[in-house]
Structures are given as C-alpha cells and as structure tokens.
Amino acid sequence: MSGSDGSGPAGRDHPFDAAVALKPADTGDGTYTGATHPAYANMVGPYGGITAATLLEAVQCHPERLGVPVSLTVNYAGPVADGEFTVSARPSRTNRSTQHWSLELTQDGRVITTATAVYAARRDTWADTEATMPDVPEPEAVPVTPMPDEVQWAKNYEMRFLDGALPALEGAPESPDSTTMLWVRDAPARPLDFPALASLCDVFYPRVFLRRGQAMPAGTISLTVYFHADEAVLADHGTRPVLARARSNRFGRSYFDQSACLWGTGGELLATTHQLVYFKG
Amino acid sequence: MSGSDGSGPAGRDHPFDAAVALKPADTGDGTYTGATHPAYANMVGPYGGITAATLLEAVQCHPERLGVPVSLTVNYAGPVADGEFTVSARPSRTNRSTQHWSLELTQDGRVITTATAVYAARRDTWADTEATMPDVPEPEAVPVTPMPDEVQWAKNYEMRFLDGALPALEGAPESPDSTTMLWVRDAPARPLDFPALASLCDVFYPRVFLRRGQAMPAGTISLTVYFHADEAVLADHGTRPVLARARSNRFGRSYFDQSACLWGTGGELLATTHQLVYFKG
C-alpha cells in the first residue's frame, strides 16, 4: 500500500515498473492503456523484453486471473511507436487448473503485437532438472560490461559476461559458436517477478552479431517463455542475478532461432525460452 | 488436379490429408469446418500433432496467405471432442515480408485450441547450422518398433528408435535422462509438407514416462514450432524419414518442458520445436 507521503511500495519506483504500468480502461473488459518508456528504447521501438513483460502484466493485474504463468508466446508483428498503446487481455478459456489468455497490443487500432499465455494452478509433483547450471564463477567475481552507450534498454540490466560478450561492431572476427552466457539482473536491483523474468528472457543481443562479428538489421519475430519458477521460488530469488545462457540451432533464409536457460544463483532453472529472429545479411 | 476417374493428386488419399481437411464456410471470412479422424485418436481427444497440422492447414489454404510458415504456437485449452469443429484463421497483420495469424479451433462456440503463426517471404542470406545431426545408422538399419496397440495415432507413423523407446509401462526402471531419438515418417509414406512437419513435431511420447518408467496422465499444453525448412527443402526431402530427438530441461510442479530437433536424412535441420506438458504424478 502506498503511504500518505506518496512513496510507493518497495520496487514500484523502479523504471521497470513505470515501463510496464497499465491503466484499466473505463470499459472494464480487460482493456488497458500504457505507454512506451524512454529508458527501454531500442533501435526501432522498445526492447522486446519490456513488451513481453507488459503483455504479461496485463494478465497479472486482470481480476479474472487464475494461478501463475507457465507459458507465454509473444509475436512481434510491427514496431511499437513511441507513445501510448492499448493492451487487450481476454481469457479465451478457463478450466479447473489452467487458464488460456489471448492478448493484443494495438496503436491507433492497428495490431502491433499478439500473444498467448497459459496460467495454471501448480501442484507438488515429482521433480527433476536435467539442464543443470554450468559451473561458473560467482557473479561478484565477474566484471560488469556495459553494452554500447547507444543501446538504451541495456542500461537497465547489469550484465556480467562469462562467454560470448557483444563483439566489437567493426573488425571483430567471426565466431564458430553462437553461445552467450552472462550473469544478469535489473539495474538498479529489483525483486524478480514474472514480468521481470519474461523481460530477462529477451536480454541476449542477436546471435548473428556474434557469429558474424558484426551488427546487422535483426529483430525477434516470436518469443516463447516457459516458466519453471513459481511465486515461492521467485520470492526466494529476490534481487540476485540470474545466469542466462543462449545459443542458436540454425541460421538461414532470413531467420535464426535461439534457445536459452535462465538459472537462479542457487542453480534452480527458473525459465527456458526460445525465439525466432529475423535478420538481414 | 483430380482426374475424372475420381483419383486425387499424389498423397491426397492419405489418412493425414483426410484428418487435416477443411471446408471453407459460406461466410468466406477465414472460417472453416473440419472433423476429427478416428485414425489420429489419442487417449483424450485427437493426437496434438494433428490438431497443430489442422490449424496450420487453415492458413495454408487461406486465400490471403503470404509466404511460408516460420513460426507456429498452438495452445491446447481443452480436449477436442469427437466430431465436427470450426477453425477460424485471421491475418492479424500483414507486412511487406511477414504475416501474423491468429487462429482458434472451437466446438459449439467454445474455444478448444488457440494458435498464432508467423508466415514470411524468405530470402537468401548467410546460413549455418550449429545443431548438427548426430552420427546415427541409416533408417533402414534400425528396426521399426510399433507403439502399443491402443495408441491409435501412432499407427500413422513408422518409428525406428535409436534411443529412449517407450518403456514397458509396468515394471520399467526409471531413466536418468529424458532423451528420445528416432527415425520417423508418415505411415504409409507421404511427401513431407508444412502441416506434416508440424504434426511430426509432437511425435514424442511424454518425457516423464521415460524418466519415471511408467505412464501417467500427461498432455501438451503449448507447442511451438520453428520451421527452418522452406518449400524447396521439403520438396527435396520427399517421403524419407526424419531424425527426431527430444529432451526435457526441467520437470516439476505439474509441468515439464521439452525441446526437439528434426533433421532430414541428409542432415538438414528442418525444424526445432518446444513444448510445455502437464503431468500428474
């Protein structure tokens, strides 16, 4: 609860919270208005992760929401223009333990982003993780490497690269392997929640830059997140960094894919995420 | 074109084609009617792969379609009941070189399945495959292993397991690894196309059966396919088997994920695919 002094609850003054903030429309039908935030600007439109987080936020604050997100797919149909946008969140079907959502972000009535999400009431079951966290140094032992100054959105993330840092964008060698691995968290630090985890799933610069040793036009066309963490795991995680590792399987004919794992500091696999990326070059 | 003797074009007499067949509604607005096919029945409702293929087929035969599929996500919101269903396919946005689709399968007005697809005009670019095909015996050197007789849909696939075949469903040991790898193709053989490739992406029995050495309630909740093959690659592939390998990253709290690669006989990566699966046990 906000105090009478106007200060918000912990974390709510963070730029991330300002960027994903949504205001319910008077229609009360799961329609919200939001606006792009300059802190998350990318080359063309905002950082894709913040758009994914904003769409998930629409479900998070929807009065009919049941349970926690287990799956999210976001399709980037066109660039979000600077300024206001509308998000519509519609439960397409509610079952006893799962709920399916259809989402759209529009500007001036035109579809900019579409998404679907699955929410669920999770229960205790047999459990095991096969994708174990690589043996890496503690975050504090790895230097922070900022992205180039013109990459506005990246200033919201503290990145400590263990492998595959952004190559110099002129004269860098080609790389035979597309793997990037880094410790990463919000900057300033912020307790991890589902929208923030969704946003982190898009934190990798385009793999084709690493392979080719140069920048070129590239943009995510579809992003999927599978949430392995539940609310208790996220609460326990707090503000610590996440170990994030991404790699591509194939590049060609204008598109490449990318798959990534995000682990908590203690080795817990928080999310797996996949995306298809357009590139030109 | 069908001849006057009533015979269809090559492959069109295949059960797969009967199962994904759609009839445009008189409304002409991208609404189609289809029906479940007994050959693709699963425990509760049809095989998820045939539903994915049917949704993709709605775009494939839509007059406004542009290009080829590059991404497909299908959300299984509820079981498809035996009988007729309606599929609606709506281009949510058409750009110069990409087209975004929103899809729904309904029965009696109730949403059963939702999906999104991205189509694109692909161009020649730099290309490379990092996920190289494992070194395995030729398909002909690997025996065909049918699934248990009660698994109706599996009779439409010729499966030659190299690793992680379905365990005996009583008294089988637990497995420390969820990997299954097999050569697989339609049975009878049928030229590979985009709907058939989408269907093959769901061909793996639930990974939790392998890990636990027993069957239990389980079902795909969301499936994503990234198509690396274009039309020329599929035409070249023909009726040969696909090498399909799947593995899970994490199981727990009612859900597990699965990621898979599908390669052509010559080693070309045709698709990568991911899913989130509900399980109880």
Image (cartoon, coloured by chain):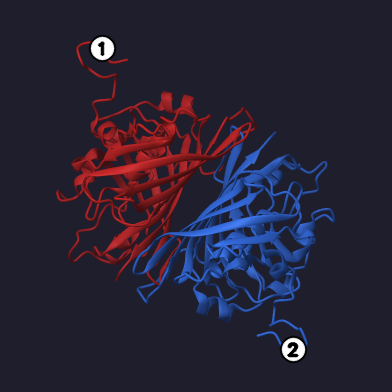
Chain colours: A blue, B red
Q: Would residue A97 be seen by someone viewing this image from the given angle? A: yes
Q: Nearer the viewer, residue B137 or A103?
A: A103
The quarter of the displayed image where residue B255 is located: bottom left
How much space separates mark 1 and mark 2, taking CA atoms? 80 Å
Q: Residue furthest top?
A: B4
Question: What label does residue A4 carry, if any?
Answer: 2
Which chain letter matches label 1?
B
> Quick check: A235 above or below A257?
below
Q: Is residue B100 left or right of residue A213?
A: left
Q: Is residue A123 left or right of residue A30?
A: left
Q: Residue furthest right?
A: A149
Residue drawn at the location 82% of the way across and 54% of the way down: A148
Q: Is residue A262 left or right of residue B14?
A: right
Please name which of the two marks, 1 or 2, marks the residue nearer to the observer: 2
Q: Position of residue B46 (x, y in %)?
A: 26, 48
Residue at disc 2, secondary structure:
loop
Q: Position of residue B140 (x, y in %)?
A: 28, 33
> Quick check: A15 above or below A279?
below
Residue drawn at the location 43% of the way across and 28% of the way down: B234
The quarter of the displayed image where residue A121 is located: bottom left
Residue drawn at the location 44% of the way across and 48% of the way down: B115
Name the amino acid type tagged 2. Answer: Ser
Which chain letter matches label 2?
A
Name the amino acid type tagged 1. Answer: Gly
Question: What label does residue B3 carry, if any?
Answer: 1
Q: Nearer the viewer, residue B206 or B54?
A: B54
Residue at disc 1, secondary structure:
loop
Q: Which part of the image, by quadrant, shows the N terminus of chain A?
A: bottom right
